[in-house]
Each structure stands twice: as C-alpha cells, then as structure tokens.
Image: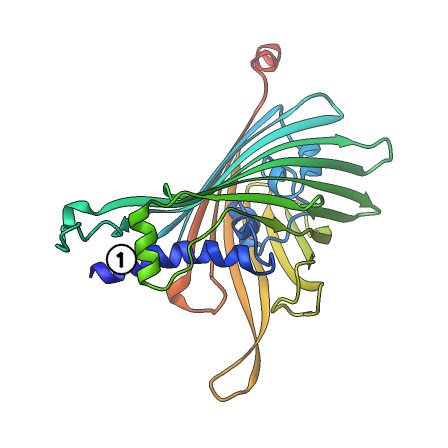
Amino acid sequence: MYKIKLTLLLLVLGIEIHAQSTAPKYSNEFLAIGIGARALGMSNSCVTTVNDVTSGYWNPAGLTKLEKDFSVGLMHAEYFAGIAKFDYGGFAAQIDSMSSFGVSVIRFGVDDIPNTTQLIDSDGNINYDRISSFSVADYAFLFSYARRSKISGLRYGANVKIIYRGVGDFAQAYGFGIDIGGQYDFKGWNFGLMARDVTTTFNAWSFSLDEKTKEVFEMTNNEIPENSTEITLPKIILGVAKNIKISKKFNVLSEINFDFSTDGQRNTLISSNPISIDPHMGLEVGYDQLIFLRMGVGNIQKSTDIYMNDKVSFQPNFGVGVKFKGVSLDYALSDIGDQSEALYSNIFSLKFDFNKLIHTKEQK
C-alpha cells in the first residue's frame, strides 16, 4: 500500500517537473475549466453575452452590464469522484454609469495526499506514524476593470491576474498575466472577443526538497527538479450570439465560440501548428426571465477506436437555472468528454445581485 501512495507523490511532482522541460502547452490549464454553472451548462460558450459577476473571468467587458450596484457569485464543483475540488468566489460593482470593477478568486486542488517519503526510518523500519499529508492546489486572483465606449454598443475591459501554485512544502510557483476583452452589439447580433494571457503569463517555480526526499527520487530514478520558469501563451476566443424573442415570455439565446490556442498543435476539431481552433456552442431557453434550460456541445476531438476507425467525440453539457429577485441558482451536469456516465460532475453556483442601501430607502 505504501508503494502506491509513494507513486502518487512522485507522479504529482513528476507532472510539475515535466512541465518545465517541455513546450508550455496546457500551462495553467485549471483556468480553462470555466466557472459558473450557467456557462458550463452551455459548454463555456458565453464570452459574447456574459453580463454578471462571472464576467471577471469570461470577459471583463460584460461587467458594464451589471443589473444592480453589486453582485456576488459562488461556485463549487468536484471532479473524479470528489478527489479534485474546484471553487470560485467573485465580487463585482458599478463604479458609475460607464464603468465597473470586479475581483475573482479561483482554487483547484487535491487535498489530503499521503506523503510517504518518510515512511521508512533510518534503521530501515516501516513506521506509519511518519506518514503526513499535503495538498496540491492552484490559485488565481483576478482584478477586473470594464468601461463602456462612446461608440454605441461597444464595451471593453481587462484583467490583471496573479497565479499561485503549490505542491505541499515541496514546490511553489508565482505567476502574473493580463487578459483583455470586448463586446459589441450590432443590429440584434452580439459579438465578443476575449484575449487571455496577451502578455504571456509567467510562472516562476521554486523547489525545496529535503535530503530524504531527494534520496527517494534518486532511488526511484526520478529527476530532481530545479528552479525554472513556465509560460502560458496567448489564447484568443471569438464569439457571436443571437437572442430571439419567441413570445412575450419565451426567448432563445444561442452562442458559438471559437478558441484559438497558440501553444502548438492540439487535438481539436481544427488542429494545426502553432494555432489550433476549438469550436463550442451553447443554447439557453428562458421563460419570463425566471426559469432557464441550457445545453451545449464542446471539447470536439478526433480519435481512433480499438478497430482503428476514425471517430469524433464531444462533450455534452446540460443545465437549469432559476432567477428571482436578485438571487440566481444554477446547476450544470458536465461530462469530462468521453460520454461516460462515470465521469459526469454536478456543478452548482449561486449569485446575489443587490443595490446600495440608500436606494432601498429612497424607494420606500
């Protein structure tokens, strides 16, 4: 059993080491998962129409369309049968009629991982009391600002983000990056652009392994990590959306996004080097701005089955939402991508929109 636990520790550290010695593909990938059950139910197709506190993540330009003075958003999700936990908290507020700001905090982590590097004492005896535990967690802190342009229908914004990634007491990294975004409404159509890591985000890794851990690495033929820098290359997301009013109370919102990654060839629907394009789309049916039904398709990939036949796989997503008097409760059922019942995750998010207390007094 202790060999299995030791292998888990070495695997976690090995992933971080490998990231330093290869191309920067999939760097800071925890920031690509997405936040908010509404967006996840639509397969992350929302950079064009997002207009609430989650805009700080999806497209800061959307912060200018806050319905009230302040907005608070929370989300919790679990992956791989609860082993990995993903949490989000956000706050946004209007500065004036033309501008808004927001703060977002994201954490993706695996907790209580057994550390068995000290399991065997200096006399060669196994001592289970020497087992401790640690966490592997990635954090992102986003500070957003958005403003309406003097051009009718045009909004723009930017994020400054700080990244912290930690592997127990063994390794840690700090990073810094900038995102920019824009939204434009034209003749009933909505267009959006989100440029992530436009300056290229840098993560500076530092490692602090004691002599006993280094000895374990050497005995298991693992490379001892050295301080290094990891970079995240830019990704451009383009989107177009249309909101159709079916009747007095029913409307249908559809949006399609195209993710342009620049970190090399990926297994996407349009795959090339260095740019690959990943399309995804979502649909939202609303009733009286009270109840919402959502669905989406994303993560479209080409693969080969056991009979060497080419096939196309995709990730289906579904969601529902309720909105009443400034409180929104959303739920999404999201698959990892293989359409297997075993890998579905249940995602919940909650949002509160409210005005300043002085407004309430004036209304009374």
Local SS, label 1: helix
Q: Is residue 293 left or right of residue 77?
A: right
Taking depth in this image into account, of 127 and 251 the one nearest to the observer is: 127
Residue 113 seen anywhere in this rendered image of the structure: no
Location of residue 118 in the rendering, given as x and y in whole percent from the top left corner: 23, 49
Measured from the top left, where is residue 51 in percent x and y?
A: 65, 38
Q: Position of residue 56 (x, y in %)?
A: 62, 37
Using the image as rendered, state which of residue 42 and residue 267 is in the foreground.
267
Crowd rating for badge 1 (residues with CA inside 10 Å; few <14, some 14–19, many 20+): some
Q: Who's the residue at 56% across and 58% down the image?
A: 295
Quadrant the N terminus occupies: bottom left
Number of numbered tags placed on the structure image: 1
Residue located beneath label 1 in the image: 5
User: Which residue appears at 17% of the width and 50% of the height?
Assistant: 122
Give the residue at x 71% y 67%.
Answer: 273
Q: Position of residue 263 (x, y in %)?
A: 66, 59
- Residue at image location 69% in from the left, 63% down from the top: 277
In this rendering, the answer to whether 340 lies above or below 358 is below
Q: Residue furthest bottom?
A: 307
Quadrant (top left, top right, bottom left, bottom right) of the C terminus: top right
Give the answer, above or below, for where 96 lies relative to 204. Answer: above
Does residue 314 appear in this view? yes
- The amino acid type, in three-letter code, at marker 1 is Lys
